[in-house]
């Protein structure tokens, strides 16, 4: 706590023009619309001011937590005594490189990125046009849809490794992308600054038509009219979480303001005033019932941050905590 207050004071002094919101409601920065106040939320003006903040945090033995569009996160109702770094306001550089690849900073939305590719007659990013995340969040989780994933289009990622403050350019292979995984969410400690995308030339109209078709499918099948964080659970091998939940009779199952979507059982939606506790309880009951009925253990896709979540410890073990924040959920599963 002391370290955090000291770091915030130093950041204010080093970057006096930067927006730094104190006691900012996290509900305003996530698609679930749930979450109490963050101690502070900084809006770095550029990649270099983001790097400066990371260096101050390291000096104070703190880890950075970068926020993208907040579309894969469940924040606690109690809020968090942490400093969040918002990438999506300013880190917006997006351009074509001389060799035809696309350069995008972490805060660029995946929909803007895929539209940019389409406008430049480049195909391969159509799958991403309806994913509401950012380049940083998309690389972190290897976002994917309709048979495409970041893994297929990322050529390299530039990131800052918080423990040594080094800048690294990682090839797609080094990013170790697999289903909803990357070395960023399996190792922790990395701040994604930008990525380069290698696409194939294609017909602009055909690319646009493909994007339209995927987005229409999304609108028809997904509860986009209600706050959610997308698929609540990962796809279990050889199965679909939504189908298992529906077969367990849980479509429409409600806890407080949280509900298994009537439209798509794979989504948990906030039907009005849901607390993080409602969502957490609902997900636990869904997981238990599905396990009883089908023997399949569902694993959360949504990153659940518990109220006692801490970034203070600067050890490699703590980095892991950053990204295995569903640990409480998993532990309870074993103890039950
Ligand atoms: C309606 C809806 C539909 C969705 N559909 C899909 C889908 O089809 N496919 C899919 O894969 N996902 C889907 N999602 C989930 C979500 O959009 C993706 O997981 C997305 O990649 C998250 O990006 P974000 O910017 O919102 O990340 P956030 O939710 O802000 O962050 C998620 C994690 O990424 C980390 N992170 C973010 N930026 C950085 C960075 N620059 N450096 C280091 N770490 C970072 C955060 O610290 C956090 O741990 C959907 C969500 C919603 C609400």
Image (cartoon, grey):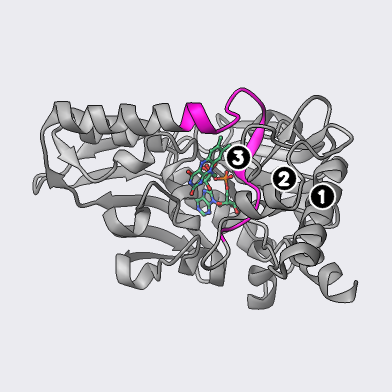
Which quadrant of the structure image shows residue 104?
top left
Residue with the mark numbered 1: 280
Instruction: Assign a secondary structure to mark 1.
Output: helix
Image location (x, y in percent) of residue 10 = 66, 47
Depth check: 273 or 29 in front?
273
Question: Separation of disc 1 and disc 3 at Cα?
Answer: 17 Å
Q: Say the numbered circle drawn on residue 74.
A: 2
Question: Separation of disc 3 and disc 2 at Cα?
Answer: 8 Å
Question: Would you say the residues marked 1 and 3 are in contact, meaning their CB atoms lie under 8 Å apart?
Answer: no
Is residue 106 something that shows in the picture? yes
Where are the magenta residues, as a range? 218-235
Question: Separation of disc 1 and disc 2 at Cα?
Answer: 9 Å
Horizontally, residue 310 falls left or right of residue 118, namely right
Q: Residue at x 62, y 38 (%)?
A: 264
Binning the other alpha carbons within 10 Å of mark 3 as few (below 14), some (14 to 19) or many (20 upward) gives many
Q: Quadrant of the N terminus?
A: bottom right
Q: Nearer the viewer, mark 1 or mark 2?
A: 1
Image location (x, y in percent) of residue 292 = 81, 66
Depth check: 41 or 138 in front?
138
Q: Say the numbered circle drawn on residue 70.
A: 3
Question: Would you say the residues marked 1 and 2 are in contact, meaning their CB atoms lie under 8 Å apart?
Answer: yes
Q: Quadrant of the C terminus?
A: bottom right
Q: Residue at x 29, y 30 (%)?
A: 115
Q: Residue at x 33, y 30 (%)?
A: 213
Q: Residue at x 38, y 46 (%)?
A: 146
In the rendered image, the vertical position of residue 66 relative to residue 313, given as above or below: above
Between disc 1 and disc 3, whose residue precedes? 3
């Amino acid at each position: 706590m002391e370290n955090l207050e000291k770091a915030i004071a130093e950041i204010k002094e080093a970057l006096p023009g930067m927006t730094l919101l104190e006691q900012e409601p996290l509900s305003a920065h996530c698609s679930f619309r749930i979450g109490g106040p963050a101690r502070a939320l900084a809006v770095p003006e550029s990649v270099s001011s983001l790097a400066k903040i990371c260096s101050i945090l390291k000096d104070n033995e703190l880890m950075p937590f970068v926020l993208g569009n907040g579309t894969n996160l469940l924040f606690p109702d109690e809020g968090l005594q942490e400093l969040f770094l918002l990438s999506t306001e300013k880190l917006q550089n997006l351009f074509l490189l001389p060799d035809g690849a696309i350069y995008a900073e972490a805060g660029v939305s995946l929909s803007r990125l895929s539209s940019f590719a389409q406008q430049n007659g480049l195909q391969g990013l159509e799958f991403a046009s309806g994913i509401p995340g950012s380049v940083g969040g998309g690389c972190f989780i290897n976002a994917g849809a309709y048979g495409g994933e970041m893994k297929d289009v990322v050529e390299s990622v530039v990131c800052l490794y918080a423990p040594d403050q080094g800048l690294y350019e990682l090839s797609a292979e080094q990013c170790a992308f697999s289903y909803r995984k990357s070395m960023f969410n399996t190792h922790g400690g990395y701040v994604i600054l930008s990525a380069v995308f290698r696409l194939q030339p294609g017909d602009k109209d055909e690319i646009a038509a493909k994007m339209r078709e995927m987005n229409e499918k999304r609108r028809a099948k997904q509860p986009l009219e209600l706050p959610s964080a997308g698929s609540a659970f990962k796809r279990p091998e050889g199965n679909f979480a939504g189908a298992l939940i529906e077969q367990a009779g849980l479509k429409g199952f409600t806890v407080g303001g949280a509900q298994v979507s009537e439209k798509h059982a794979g989504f948990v939606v906030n039907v009005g005033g849901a607390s993080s506790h409602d969502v957490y309880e609902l997900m636990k009951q869904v997981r238990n019932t599905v396990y009883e009925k089908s023997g399949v253990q569902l694993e959360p896709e949504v990153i659940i941050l518990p109220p006692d979540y801490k970034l203070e410890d600067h050890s490699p073990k703590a980095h892991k905590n950053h990204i295995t924040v569903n640990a409480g959920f998993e532990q309870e599963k074993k103890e039950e």
